[in-house]
Image (cartoon, rainbow, N blue to C red):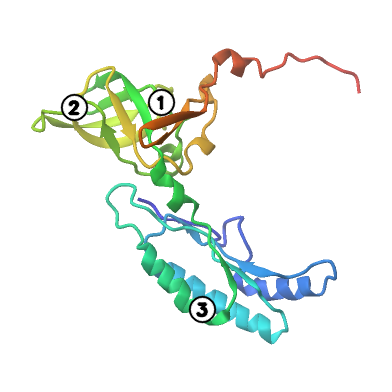
Amino acid sequence: MRKFQLGKRQDKFGISIKEALDVYELASSLENIHIKGIDVHIGSQINDLQPFEKTFNCIVETISKLKDKSINIEIIDIGGGIGINYTDEDALNINDYAALISKKFRSLNKKIIIEPGRYLTAESGILVTKIIYIKENASKKFIIVDAAMNDFIRPSLYGSLHNALQLTEDNNEKDIKNYDVVGPICETGDFFIKNFKTSKLSEGDLIAITNVGAYGSVLSSNYNSRPSITEIMIKEDNYSIIKKRQDIDEMINQDILADWQKN
């Protein structure tokens, strides 16, 4: 699983640590600006404490320097980035993360804000999709499903890795083969999983792509004129449709023929 870095020199995000003090001084000179806190976000899907510890040290040092300039920080927003176990990686131990926060910031007596969006939501969602065709060529086997990159684009966009679950009973553990799980859109980037190991499946079988609760639905689109899919929430033995499947006519009717007006 890739670890995504943000705020590098070549990126559009944030202010460098070297510029931060000057920016705070400028802000403190403006009568309509009231400085409340400091905010950082170093990346995403981080499963190692070391980058967080290095960042927290920078925050503590910056707050100390600001205090010397009579600039008081009340709030520390340490951002997100907490990783989860998408495939077989070791996820960040949340208790160790909490202990690190306490160790670094307890003595400062500041309000701490955390943004653990992926950690809270990623494992809550699966994408259930039906096999519509199984294709084999001289060097590759493909499972083509009815979901596509417009429904879930993370693998194509980021090269992200996800697991899948076979939702039909598998009693043939000896006949394991490698498949690429792909969608039906005419794009080489329309894929979900490379080298998915499973026994022979059939058209009409269902599989579930796991851990799609973060950066799943919110990144979906109508690319290739594909309607958005149904979203269902499940609680114990109950379920509720929380987003209806989009009708193709509803999607097309959003387009309006040009009705030219003079300026």
165 or 106, nearer to the observer: 106
Give the residue type at disc 3. Answer: Arg
In the picture, the disc for residue 147 is: 1
Q: Which residue is mark 3?
A: 106
Q: Which residue is mark 2?
A: 169
Image height check: is 47 above or below 154? below
**First-in-chain label (1 vs 3):** 3
Instruction: Name the residue located 79 percent from the left edge and 67 percent from the top edge.
Output: 33
Asked which secondary structure carries label 1, the reply is loop
Asked which secondary structure carries label 3, the reply is helix
Q: Quadrant of residue 70?
A: bottom right
- Using a 10 Å C-alpha cutoff, classify the residue at mark 1 as few (fewer than 14 neighbours), some (14 to 19) or many (20 or more): many
Image height check: is 49 above or below 258? below
**Does residue 159 appear in the picture of this structure?**
no
Q: Quadrant of residue 170?
A: top left
Instruction: Locate residue 37, reporting x and y percent.
Output: 66, 69
Image height check: is 67 above or below 39? below
Q: Quadrant of the C terminus?
A: top right
